Amino acid sequence: MAQFAGLDVSLKEMSACVVDDAGKVLCERTVPTEPDDKAVLLTSIGGDYARFGIEAGPLSQWLVNGLNEAGFR
């Protein structure tokens, strides 16, 4: 089952919402704005992520690089 994650980024916190391919919400959480924290959250949920939606802004590239280093593409 494919999963999709939406990430809303601010300076101190990131909000994440993960849904499955049927649109069912699997997880909604807020974690500190650090790539490692986001990677831990996404890994703990598990599954096969088909797409990530990340809010565009000055922190986006830093987070994308951190997620890529954690094995998320």
Image (spheres, rainbow, N blue to C red):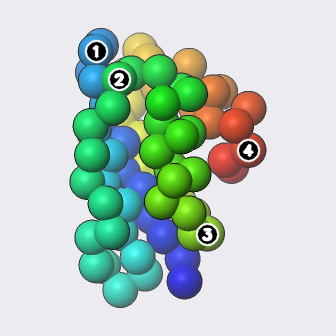
Q: Amino acid at mark 2?
A: Pro
Q: Which residue is mark 2?
A: 32
Residue at horizontal 41 percent and vertical 40 percent from the top: 54
- The earlier-in-sequence mark between 2 and 3 is 2
Sort mark 1 into few (<14), some (14-19) or many (20+) by Cα contacts within 10 Å: few
- Report whether residue 9 is seen: no
- Residue denoted by label 3: 48
Q: In terms of depth relative to the viewer, which is nearer, 33 or 43?
A: 43
Q: Amino acid at mark 1?
A: Lys
Identity, as a three-letter code, of the amino acid under mark 4 = Gly
Query: What residue is pinned by disc 1?
Result: 12
Picture layout, residue 69 above or below residue 54: above
Give the foreground label among 2 and 3.
2
Distance from disc 1 to disc 4, alpha carbons, whole Å, reads 23 Å
> What quarter of the picture does the N terminus occupy?
bottom right
Q: Earlier in the sequence, mark 1 or mark 4?
A: 1
Dot 4: what SS? loop
Q: Which residue is mark 4?
A: 71
In this rendered view, identify the residue nearer to me: 68 or 36.
36
What distance separates the C-alpha of mark 1 from that of mark 2? 6 Å
Q: Earlier in the sequence, mark 1 or mark 2?
A: 1
